[in-house]
Each structure stands twice: as structure tokens, then as C-alpha cells.
Amino acid sequence: MNTVALRQWHVDEIDLANDGFYGLSFDDRDEAYRVLRRERPVAHFAERAEPPFEAGPGFWALTRHADVVEASRSADVYSSAEGTLIRDRPSIDIATVLHSMFDMDDPGHAKRRKLVADFFTARAVSGFAATVERLVDEILDDVVERGECDLANDVAKRLPVAVTCDLMGVPPLDRAWIQQRTTVVSAYGDPSVLPGQSLPVMQALNNANELGQYGVELAKHRRKAPTDDMMSRLAHAQIDGRRLTDDELAQWFLLFQSAGSETTGHAITKGVAAFDAFPEQRAAWMADFDGLAPTAIEEILRWSSPVIQFRRTLTRDIVLHDQELHAGDKIVLVYSAANRDEDAFEHPYRFDIRRKKNHHVAFGGAGPHNCLGAPIARRELRVMMRAIFERLPDLELAAEPTVLRSTIVSGIREMPVLFTPTARKGN
Ligand code: HEM
């Protein structure tokens, strides 16, 4: 339970369109979501002009679990084709890199998803387990002797970037370059990620474009010398009897790097923060790691909810909770809010690694776009948490974590930690 007094919200004060909202503490945001779920489950927010975006038509936010699940599953009514970020894709050239299969409806989306789905089966992921363990060992080796580090950047973020790079065929030397860019892309507007720079959204788009172009170059190499990685697959793949274009290869590369990297990193960081705040949960898991791992991992995912929200656009008029909504309206599915819904979870504000009924929507509401990388993310969480418990058993927070101010990713920008130094495993 919270020990700090929560901000008291009047429902009219809450503005999910104001970037400032995303700089508030997680507890204050959760409290605002609670008020919305109870008093205004379909809430409208205006979109102001902010270069490169024009003032948009505004959006409706769904904060209840049942509504988020229903909207996720009813893709014929709640379409992804107009974009999945709240703001429309800016009409500038470099923004085409955002137009991946994630921003498509079936059948086009399903055809594309099928091209790589076998990289994410349970079998494929368990074949990948040794790689994840090796990567975790290497990452922890770089910090264990120091007795302190920034867990968010020195540890948590590095794993998913390394895993996604490995999956896609990016050489290890390029990982740091990729990590820098995915951080800027996923912040999508947090001015503190690039201090001193104007137009953080333009910076995010430029970085997104650079990542896309990297993917195109990698695919060119793989056309000449294929291996068993995902870019080799995509470089030779056919859609409707033709090869993927450079634009499409760029979109794929960006989608996987951004979807796979920041999300999992923030789940790890917020998971470690939760165990610091709830030491009895940490002691319980350390005492029976394998026994509690299945439920503990789901609880970390629910608790951390690394993706705040994605958007859909209505294909026809509907009425929801007495509110008339019209074809073309933007609807935002607030996963972070749904994951604290009292009607879906018993004691939702309790971090409980033994939680039984945990149908969280951290990976989406089980619709056609449900997270493809979920089995990999679960594996990364398991291996990393075990390694932290074993190698840094007395790790504790050295200062309050800094919240990332992003409208997409619910994360921690920096989290200094202390621990008793231990020996490296490798040379
Ligand atoms: C804790 C980590 C992660 C979280 C919380 C997360 C969350 C999500 C969410 C909320 C969606 C949208 C679901 C929807 O619209 O219904 C999504 C889609 C997606 N995720 Fe993840 N994700 C994570 C890790 C990963 C990883 C590791 C990868 C790949 C390496 C990945 C790849 C994708 C892809 C490709 C999609 C789009 C799927 C589609 O359009 O069919 N994600 N993820």
C-alpha cells in the first residue's frame, strides 16, 4: 500500500493529452486512472497543436479492463490502420517508418505477422534460453565489482537490446548505437532524454528513421550472405508475390527494436523497484524462485505495465457506457489503467507475486496485435531476476528513481542502486 499521500483528483482536472501528466509519479497517475474508471470510463481529451503535430480532433480514453479487452479483440470496429499512437502520423517523409504491420488491420497485418511468427514460439524461445543467460552474465559482469550502478541503463535496458539485436542479426558492436536510438524513440517526447534539444518528437522521428535505415543496410548484407536471423528471413520474404521494399524493411526493423527493447527494460527496472518497496515479496521469491516464477513474472508485468497506451480508430458509430462515439473517433486503450482495475483484480494496488487470477493487459488485450514478443520478454525477466537475486542479493535503491516522461512507455529513466561487490563470472 502507498505510504505517501496521493494526489486527490477532480475528474475535470485530469488531462491525458497533457504531456505533463506523464511526468507525474506512477502513484499519482494511478489515482487519476482510478477516478476516470469510476467517474468517466469513456473520457474525452483535446489535442493541442505541437510541432510537428497539428491540433488533432482529440481522443477518447478507455480505462476499464473490460473495455480495453473488448476493444483489443474487436479489431473490425477498433481499427489500427489510421495509426496506433495518439497523435496522427505526421505528414513528413521520415514518418513513413512508423507505418509497420502494427499500424495495419487484417488480412494485411496477419500475412506479415506470419512471416516471423515462428521466431516467437515456445520452442524457439527455449532454444534461445542459453543465449539470454550468457547475455545476462555478460551484462552483470560489467557492474558486479563496482558496488553501485544505474540499474535502468547499465543493466535492465542492455538485455532486451542485446536480445533483440541477436534475434535480428545486429553485430554486438552496434548494440550501444541501437540502444541510444531506441531510448530516444520510445521516450517520444521526453525532453530530458535529449537535454538542450528542441522538438523532442522530431528527434524521436529522426532516430526512428536512422534505425530503419540501419535495418535496410543489414537486410542488403543478408541478401548476399543469409544466416538464420530475422533480417535474413525478411530480406528474402515475399508478400503478395513480391519482395519487401526498403521502406517495409525499415519499418520491420524499427518495430522490433522499439517494441522489444524499451518495454522489457522498464519491466525489469520497475520489477526491481517493486521488490525494493515490498521486501517480503522479494524474500518469498528468493526462497522459492522456480515455484513462484510463473505468477511472479505475470505480477511484474501487471505492476509495471511498460506500455501505457495505444490507439485505435472507430470504423463505425457505437455507444459505450451511454456515450455516443462516431466512425473516425480516436480511441485510446489505457493498459496502465486497466491493469489496476478493481473489477478485474483483487486488491489491484497490492504487489503480490502469488496472484492467481492475473489477466493483465500488459501485452495487450488478446486481440490480433497481441504482443508477439511476449514469450521472449517473459524469458528475459525470469533469467535477469534470478541472476540479480543470486549475484546481487542485497541490492537496494540508492536514490529515488527518475520517472521517464513518455506518453507511450511507463518507465524509469535512471535508478541508482547499491550492493556488495561480487566477483565477475567471465574473464
Ligand atoms: C515486457 C515487455 C513487453 C511489453 C510490455 C510489450 C507490450 C506490447 C503491447 C501492449 C503491444 C500491443 C498489443 C495490442 O495492440 O494488442 C505489443 C505489440 C508488439 N510487441 Fe511487445 N511488448 C514487450 C516485449 C516485446 C518483445 C521482447 C518483442 C520482440 C522482440 C515485442 C514485439 C512486439 C511486436 C512485433 C508487436 C506488434 C504485434 C502485431 O502488430 O501483431 N514486444 N507489445
Image (spheres, helix red, strand yellow):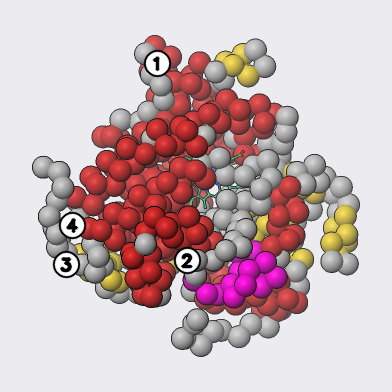
Residue labelled with disc 2:
353
Query: Label 4's element?
Result: loop
Q: Which of pointers 1 and 2 indicates the residue nearer the eye?
A: 2
Residue kind at label 4, given as amino acid type: Val
Q: Could you tell me which residue is drawn at 59 percent across and 72 percent down?
A: 348
Query: Label 3's element?
Result: loop
In the displayed structure image, the side of residue 115 where residue 411 appears, left or right: left
Sequence-first disc among 4 and 1: 4
Report whether the residue tagged 3 is closer than 8 Å to ligand 1: no
Question: How far is disc 1 from disc 2 in space, using C-alphas?
Answer: 43 Å
Sequence-first disc among 1 and 2: 1
Residue labelled with disc 3:
420
Question: How far is disc 4 from disc 1 in space, using C-alphas?
Answer: 37 Å
Q: Along the line of sight, which residue is nearer the eye, 247 or 174?
A: 174
Sequence-first disc among 2 and 4: 4
Q: Which of pointers 2 and 3 indicates the residue nearer the eye?
A: 2
Residue kind at label 2, given as amino acid type: Ile
Q: Are marks 3 and 1 in contact (CB under 8 Å)?
A: no
Estimate the x, y position of residue 243 in percent, counting from the top left. 57, 15
Is 350 a magenta residue? Answer: yes
Residue kind at label 1, given as amino acid type: Pro
The quadrant holding residue 427 is top left
Sequence-first disc among 3 and 4: 4
Residue range of the region highlighted in magenta in the rendering:
335-351
Query: Label 2's element?
Result: loop
Q: Could you tell me which residue is drawn at 32 percent across and 48 percent down?
A: 158
Residue labelled with disc 4:
144
Sequence-first disc among 3 and 1: 1
Q: Which of pointers 4 and 1 indicates the residue nearer the eye?
A: 4
Asked if one can make out residue 191 in the rendered structure from this viewpoint, the answer is: no
Sequence-first disc among 2 and 3: 2
Question: How far is disc 3 from disc 4 in space, using C-alphas?
Answer: 8 Å
